[in-house]
Amino acid sequence: LESRFLIFLNFLTMATDNSIGPEGVIAIAEVLGTNTKLSHLNLSKVGANDDAAFSLSKALMSNTKLVELNITSNSLLIV
């Protein structure tokens, strides 16, 4: 998924049993920090791990547009 496409999206669903893995989630997180359009992001069942969740949390510190994030059914150990 190229970052230039994320600037046009309001909703993005990557939820699947065929995972994009931690690397894919981290790539999305890198763009999410500066994204001004995306309001809903579904990353359930994508194979995310704690490193991916940490990258998302850092991105969310500067993102003011995202109102819904679904990361259920991943391998997260962070509590």
Image (tube, grey):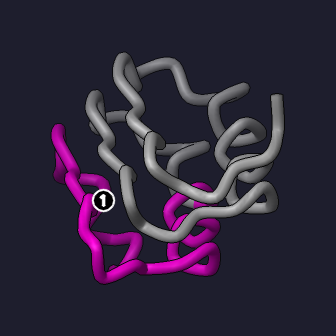
Give left or right: position of 77 versus 2: right
Give left or right: position of 25 versus 6: right
Measuring 29% from the left and 54% from the top, which residue is drawn there? 7
Q: Secondary structure at mark 1?
A: helix
Q: What's under tag 1, amino acid-wise?
A: Leu
Measuring 80% from the left and 61% from the top, which residue is drawn there? 51
Say how many tags the image has.
Answer: 1
Give 36 or 54, whichever is nearer the viewer. 54
| Spot occupied by residue 26 in the image (x, y as percentages of width and height) | 63, 67
Give left or right: position of 51 versus 57: right
Residue that numbered label 1 is attached to: 6
Q: Residues within 10 Å of mark 1 (few under 14, many from 20)?
A: some
Quadrant of image for the C terminus: top right
User: Is residue 50 positioned above or below 22 on the image?
Assistant: above
| Spot occupied by residue 71 in the image (x, y as percentages of width and height) | 47, 42
| Spot occupied by residue 77 in the image (x, y as percentages of width and height) | 79, 46
User: Is residue 47 positioned above or below 11 on the image?
Assistant: below
Check residue 44 for magenta coloring: no
User: Is residue 75 positioned above or below 41 on the image?
Assistant: below
Check residue 2 for magenta coloring: yes
Give left or right: position of 36 versus 40: right
Quadrant of image for the N terminus: bottom left
Measuring 77% from the left and 39% from the top, which residue is drawn there? 58
Residue bounds of the magenta highlight? 1-30
**Residue 36 falls in image quadrant:** top left
Measuring 69% from the left and 50% from the top, which residue is drawn there? 76
| Spot occupied by residue 14 in the image (x, y as percentages of width and height) | 27, 62
**Residue 68 falls in image quadrant:** top left
**Residue 45 falls in image quadrant:** bottom left
